[in-house]
Amino acid sequence: MIKLATIKQMRRERNRLYNIEWRKKNRSKTRESYRLWAERNPDKVKANRDKQNKVNGPKHMVFKGKIIILKERVLTGICSWCGYKGYTHMHHLQYHDDDPLKDTIELCPSCHTSRHEQMKRSRRRENRK
């Protein structure tokens, strides 16, 4: 009977952690629960940290259908236009066959999409003239 009680308590605690309002009110309990979980699952914690470290981008890039291996990570994870911190894309202002990183800026997915839309609109205007 003791085991069932502890399982019920564990389920109740897990459900509380999914409730955002409860987490905000009980930050210390949330941290303690995560710490205990991390002690029981060190392999999952390591995998998650490895994923987070990839924010700075891979050490390779695809340029005109070819994979280019870079000496160091070139992405900083900060959008040049809006300042968003997180996942970013490299946007080529102009393509150079000799140096694929020349004339590039770093944009978040939203700004990257809007930049391409602007380029499409300007091409349409030029074609009309």
Image (cartoon, grey):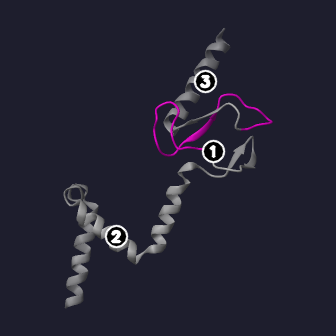
Q: Residue furthest bottom?
A: 1
Write down the region rendered in magenta: 75-100
Is residue 51 toward the left or the right of residue 25 in the image? right
Quadrant of the rendered structure where residue 113 is? top right
How busy is the neighbourhood of tag 1: few (under 14 within 10 Å), some, or many (20 plus)? some
Residue at 49% over, 36% down = 110
- Residue 119 is labelled as 3
Total tally of numbered discs in the picture: 3
Image quarter in which the N terminus is found: bottom left
Please, what is the dominant secondary structure of the magenta stretch?
loop
Q: Earlier in the sequence, mark 2 or mark 3?
A: 2
Q: Earlier in the sequence, mark 1 or mark 2?
A: 2
Cα separation between marks 2 and 3? 48 Å
Return the residue at label 2. Answer: 35
In the image, residue 53 lies in the stretch drawn in magenta: no
Secondary structure at numbered mark 3: helix
In the image, residue 93 lies in the stretch drawn in magenta: yes
